[in-house]
Image (tube, helix red, strand yellow):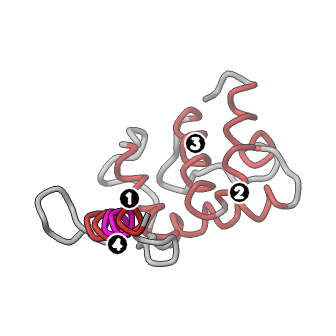
Amino acid sequence: MRRTATVLLAACALLTLTACGTHDGTQAAPEASKSTVYKLRPEDQWRQSINAAGITSWTEDAGPSGDELEAMPKDWCKALKGGHSVQWLLGEGGLYPIGEDWGTEKSEAHKLVVLGTEAYCPKLAGRVKAELRETGEY
């Protein structure tokens, strides 16, 4: 009985020690918690997603300024939180992404609203996508 207890204790100790390392004997890196994972600021996420989206209706010499870009998703989120729809945003809400010297095609405007809500008000992004899917716009 004493021998069985000793063997079990040794096995548990060995298991504990091997669980702390990797298969090659090096120490395993601790798993990052949500609080330590780097998260982009909404402004940075917004700009990166716009660059990746390849908005073709904006040309190099005609596109929104940095200030205009920053204002778009903030205004959309405010209106969406107020219960407005994407259709309202881009229609009577007057929040269509268009300036004096530049404009955005409708399909790209929808894409921008999705990207903006994902960056600035991610809790509303699912609602935006669902609305656009219902209308066949996403």
Identify the residue at horizontal 72%, vertical 53% (top origin). Answer: 124
Numbered range of the magenta stretch: 6-12
What kind of residue is marked 2? Lys
Q: Are marks 4 and 3 in contact (CB under 8 Å)?
A: no
Mark in the foreground, 4 or 3: 4
Mark 2: secondary structure: helix
User: Which residue in the structure is indicated by mark 2?
Assistant: 123
Cα–Cα span, label 1 and label 4 = 29 Å
Crowding at dot 1, Cα within 10 Å, few <14 / some 14-19 / many 20+, comes out as few
Mark seen at residue 56: none
Identify the residue at horizontal 31%, vertical 68% (top origin): 10
At label 3, the amino acid type is Ala
Q: Nearer the viewer, residue 21 or 54?
A: 21
* Real-space CA distance between mark 2 and mark 3, rounded to the nearest whole angstrom: 20 Å
Which disc, if any, is residue 48?
1
Percent from the top left, x then y, of residue 72?
61, 61
Task: Assign a secondary structure to mark 4.
Answer: loop
Residue tagged 3: 109
> Mark 2 vs mark 1: which is more N-terminal?
1
Whichever of labels 4 and 3 marks the residue nearer the N terminus, that label is 4
Residue position for label 4: 30
